[in-house]
DNA sequence: TTGATCACG
DNA sequence: GACGTACGTGATCAAC
């Protein structure tokens, strides 16, 4: 074989991508009103390939029409395919135009499918010694994988080789055709053999080697039904194989040599792009080159492509050209004064603080950066040890940076910053400004008023993507930021920011403030346009100082009690370890699910084990062990051991480690922009998952206590999510029940199953309770069955009965699904938007998952809105009555306060009143309050 | 770094 | 008819 004249051939499955791009992206239209979402998606994919691949030959292959040679073999082949959606039809020719505009070859041939042309070119290229990559995710092309031929799915950014093919079909690529022939394909109308799916087909082919052998020896098959269907459908299987097998001998219209990758003609390409109104693509194409004449002002946000909806798959939008930067290191008083004065004159300044730890309460201020205009920022070092960290050889020689500029005295800096940061006429913009508020607060600075770009992004596109600065900079500004890791290193070698040399610190810190300011320019104006001003200004921004105060307050834990529990748990664990290894007959690591699975299902041969499809590991979850418990003494002991291990390591030990030595309390951190629904999350430590459900676990909660002379007060919303369901869906039966203040699960049981509440069987109530919860989660028969340990069929009957009694719930679910399909997001009562990714995914399981998430989001998010409203009002409401209670914790539907003993009753009344009045619904809100020395008893 | 497990609402 | 599941989180450990 001679050396190929080219090395790597890319063959793009054009038709496949048209459909995927169309379904993956929200509707958008060009200036003429023609829909172009598929065109946009296609171009994005093509550009990615052209810039990121090593292709030296590349062509896009399309289907020429519907009729192919396969219809002569089997007239019904692909006969029931619906016509393409109306919005897609005009895009077929536009996409061909787009490909040509990129100067990329475009091939199609009547009578053959694109797949046959791809098979033929792939064979030719491979025979010439070139590497081939088929760009597609179509399983029908997987038969071609092997040798020099591979596949690449650009949407998932995933290489598909023999291993991935095996994962999909459970056979090697050369047997894929036989498996498909047996299994058939309903979407293409390939008949296959009835009753045989991919799983069975793969099993048969692996056993008999190939389709012909299998059909010849079909008589040997043990299962009578399978034997007969195979024998009587042998011909169908052979025809199916002809339909499925790709032709690699098509007389192709163009030779491979024509597919050279060429530079596009700039004018032609930009002409086409402008005609379609793809400004972000234009920006990318012209990036790095002299900016086009008369660039727009950078902070002015462009309007988006008309009708476009932001989706996680792509955020089509304007990407400003790069900004020239001018960053100044501030080490002179005069320079500092100049920046402070300029900031006060500007009326808006982006602020970012650098510290030597991520814990805002234990760190020192290392530096402050300010930005006043795009590209114009400064860094004011406060505490820098130059590059001392690098100087392991500091034997008398001058320390690196020791001769360089020195920070101004901290007191001078703080005094001057106060004029700017506390000026009520100057808006301070931060990214996750709660952190900066904490740090600057420790220096005696009360920063206000504020804006937060992280929260702006969160209210605009929660659920669509993360809201970290690096991610937003890339997304909205097309700018890749310097990462913290690049400045400070990662892992063991990581240094604290005060050890970063000043020049690097300047580049990193000033950029953060600069980017924050530029993000603010892009995001803030969108609030008005997208009706999110209220959510931002009444639910998110005012919560920042409230949460900052809660974090600063922390909560007292009984250290000695936690330590003695840790010792006790450890002792009891060793006892279990001894027993368990005795029962197993070998020493092993009980904490290793892998080893435990092997003991249970291979050594002890217990029944009912299931290996996970993904890793092939035995499942050993609590539900599995619970089932095994009656059969053998070991599983129960493992369950008990696990409970203790969890309590010891995650709670007892970890909480003690987290006690702040300065306050003797634990201070959690609340994340405001993590969840897709609007909830907060808590970490370091997570105080939203402290045990309560078991007696043993509740002992941990008993260690959360109040200072002497104080009590803990816990106030929680009763059934808030179910109340929201009743209100939002307008379920009359449930609304009445809540108004009457009855036991809601018992009433539900009574109304759905027709039994009286008096003397009701607790198992009936339990079922009703499970359905009520299921409704909140976007119910499925499978999920309910799993929860209650009943059959799918029985679960379905319950759900049907529930829907029949409360028909409004079905309308709500249908309405929500329709809405999320159309616009990609749902909203809460208070207007919070929640994007739900995957709703138009081609995988039905993904879609079903997204539908359930969409049903849940307005409920969970609505409840989050309500408690946020209460949290914002409570500090003022308490102060107004002269009460000094401090709010310490939020656990989704519960607030915990530390209250002086003399103020308990007054505080109880205010908290209950404010929380219950936080929303006005068709159902009453009920808040239950408890007061005690520990959290366990107060709850 | 990823997956399994389990703590919470 | 297949997909593979209740919704939303974070911490820990084992195993790559």
Image (cartoon, coloured by chain):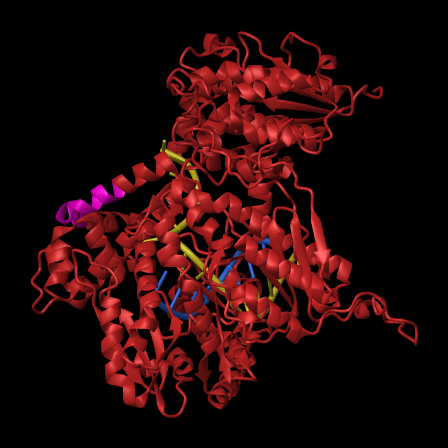
Chain colours: A red, B blue, C yellow
Up-down relation of residue A403 to residue A64 (above or below): below
Residue, far right: A396
Asked if one can make out residue A704 in the rendered structure from this viewpoint, the answer is yes
The question of residue A812 being in magenta is answered with yes
In depth, the one of A339 and A550 nearer the eye is A339
At x 14%, y 61%, the residue is A738
Residue A187 x, y percent position in the rendering: 42, 24
Up-down relation of residue A866 to residue A269 (above or below): below
In depth, the one of A145 and A582 nearer the eye is A145
Residue A556 x, y percent position in the rendering: 45, 83
Dominant SS type (magenta): helix
The question of residue A917 being in magenta is answered with no
Up-down relation of residue A763 to residue A64 (above or below): below
Residue, far bottom: A708
Residue A39 x, y percent position in the rendering: 52, 23
Quadrant for the C terminus of chain A in the image:
bottom left
At x 68%, y 27%, the residue is A50
Quadrant for the N terminus of chain A in the image:
top right
Asked if one can make out residue A215 in the rendered structure from this viewpoint, the answer is no
In depth, the one of A748 and A172 nearer the eye is A748
Residue A137 x, y percent position in the rendering: 55, 31
| Horizontal side, residue A319 vs residue A104: left or right | left
| Horizontal side, residue A640 vs residue A818: left or right | right
- Tally of numbered discs: 0
| Horizontal side, residue A46 vs residue A767: left or right | right
Magenta span of residues: A801-814
């Amino acid at each position: 074989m001679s050396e190929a004249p080219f090395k790597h051939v890319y063959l793009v499955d054009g038709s496949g991508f048209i459909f995927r791009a169309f379904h993956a992206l929200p509707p958008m239209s060009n200036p003429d009103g023609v829909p172009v979402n598929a065109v946009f998606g296609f171009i994005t994919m093509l550009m990615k390939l052209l810039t990121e691949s090593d292709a030296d030959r590349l062509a896009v292959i399309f289907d020429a029409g519907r009729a192919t040679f396969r219809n002569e073999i089997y007239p019904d082949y692909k006969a029931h395919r619906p016509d393409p959606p109306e919005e897609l039809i005009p895009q077929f020719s536009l996409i061909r135009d787009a490909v040509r505009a990129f100067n990329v070859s475009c091939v199609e041939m009547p009578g053959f499918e694109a797949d046959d042309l791809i098979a033929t070119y792939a064979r030719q290229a491979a025979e010439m010694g070139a590497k081939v990559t088929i760009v597609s995710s179509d399983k029908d092309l997987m038969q071609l994988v092997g040798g020099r031929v591979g596949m690449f799915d650009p949407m998932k950014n995933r290489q598909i080789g023999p291993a991935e093919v095996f994962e999909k079909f459970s056979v090697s690529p050369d047997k894929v055709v036989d498996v498909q022939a047996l299994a058939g394909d309903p979407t293409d109308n390939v008949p296959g053999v009835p009753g045989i799916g991919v799983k069975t087909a793969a099993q048969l082919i692996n056993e008999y080697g190939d389709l012909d052998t299998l059909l010849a020896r079909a008589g040997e098959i043990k299962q009578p039904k399978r034997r007969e269907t195979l024998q009587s459908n042998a011909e169908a299987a052979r025809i199916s194989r002809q339909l499925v097998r790709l032709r690699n001998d098509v007389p192709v219209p163009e030779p491979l040599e024509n597919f050279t990758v060429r530079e596009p003609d700039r004018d032609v390409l930009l002409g086409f792009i402008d005609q379609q109104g793809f400004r972000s693509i234009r920006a990318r194409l012209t990036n790095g080159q002299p900016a086009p004449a008369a660039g727009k002002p950078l902070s002015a946000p462009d309007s988006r492509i008309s009708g476009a909806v932001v989706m996680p798959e792509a955020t089509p939008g304007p990407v400003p050209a790069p900004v020239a930067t001018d960053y100044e290191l501030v080490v002179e008083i005069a320079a500092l004064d100049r920046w402070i004065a300029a900031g006060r004159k500007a009326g808006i300044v982006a602020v970012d603080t650098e510290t030597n730890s991520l814990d805002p309460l234990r760190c020192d201020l290392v530096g402050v950066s300010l930005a006043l205009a795009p590209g114009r920022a400064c860094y004011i070092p406060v505490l820098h040890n130059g590059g001392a960290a690098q100087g392991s050889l500091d034997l008398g020689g001058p320390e690196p940076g020791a001769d360089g500029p020195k920070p101004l005295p901290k007191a001078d800096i703080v005094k001057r910053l106060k004029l700017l940061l506390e000026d009520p006429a100057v808006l301070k913009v931060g990214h996750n400004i709660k952190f900066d508020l904490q740090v600057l607060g420790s220096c005696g600075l009360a920063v206000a008023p504020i804006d937060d770009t992280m929260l702006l992004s969160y209210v605009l596109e929660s659920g669509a993507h993360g809201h970290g600065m690096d991610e937003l900079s890339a997304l909205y500004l097309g700018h890749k930021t310097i990462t913290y890791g690049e400045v400070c290193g990662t892992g063991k070698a990581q240094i604290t920011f005060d050890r970063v040399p000043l020049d690097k610190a300047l580049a990193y810190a000033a950029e953060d403030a600069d980017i924050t300011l530029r993000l603010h320019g892009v995001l803030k104006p969108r609030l008005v346009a997208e009706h999110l001003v209220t959510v931002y200004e009444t639910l998110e921004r005012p919560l920042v100082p409230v949460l900052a105060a809660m974090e600063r307050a922390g909560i007292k834990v009984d250290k000695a009690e936690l330590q003695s529990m840790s010792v006790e748990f450890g002792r009891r664990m060793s006892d279990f370890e001894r027993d368990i290894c005795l029962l197993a007959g070998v020493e092993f690591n009980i904490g290793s699910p892998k080893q435990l699975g092997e003991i249970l299902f291979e050594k002890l041969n217990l029944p009912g084990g299931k290996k996970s499809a993904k890793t092939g590991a035995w499942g050993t979850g609590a539900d599995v062990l619970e089932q095994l418990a009656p059969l053998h003494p070991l599983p129960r002991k493992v369950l008990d051991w696990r409970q203790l291990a969890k309590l010891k390591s995650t709670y007892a030990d970890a909480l003690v480690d987290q006690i702040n030595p300065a306050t003797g309390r634990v201070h959690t951190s609340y994340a405001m922009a993590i969840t897709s629904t609007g909830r907060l999350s808590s970490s370091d430590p997570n105080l939203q998952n402290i045990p309560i459900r078991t007696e043993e676990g509740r002992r941990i909660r008993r260690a959360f206590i109040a200072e002497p002379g104080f009590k803990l007060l816990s106030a929680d919303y009763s059934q808030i999510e179910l109340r929201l369901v009743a209100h939002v869906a307008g379920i009359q039966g449930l609304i009445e029940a809540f108004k009457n203040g009855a036991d809601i699960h018992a009433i539900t049981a009574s109304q759905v199953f027709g039994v009286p509440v008096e003397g009701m069987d607790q198992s009936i109530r339990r079922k009703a309770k499970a359905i009520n919860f299921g409704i909140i989660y976007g119910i499925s028969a499978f999920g309910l069955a799993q929860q209650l340990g009943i059959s799918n069929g029985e679960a379905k009957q319950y759900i049907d009965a529930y829907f029949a009694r409360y028909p409004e719930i079905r309308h709500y679910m249908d309405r929500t699904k329709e809405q999320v399909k159309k616009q990609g997001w749902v909203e809460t009562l208070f207007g919070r938007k929640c994007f739900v990714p995957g709703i138009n995914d081609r995988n039905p399981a993904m879609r079903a998952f997204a539908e359930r998430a969409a049903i849940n989001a307005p409920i969970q998010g609505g409840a989050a809105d309500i408690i946020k409203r209460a949290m914002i009002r409570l500090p003022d409401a308490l102060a107004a009555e002269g009460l000094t209670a401090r709010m310490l914790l939020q656990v989704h539907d519960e607030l915990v306060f530390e209250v002086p003993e003399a103020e308990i009753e007054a505080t109880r009344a205010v908290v209950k009143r404010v929380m219950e009045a936080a929303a006005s619904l068709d159902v009453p809100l009920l808040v239950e309050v408890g007061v005690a020395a520990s959290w366990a008893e107060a709850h």
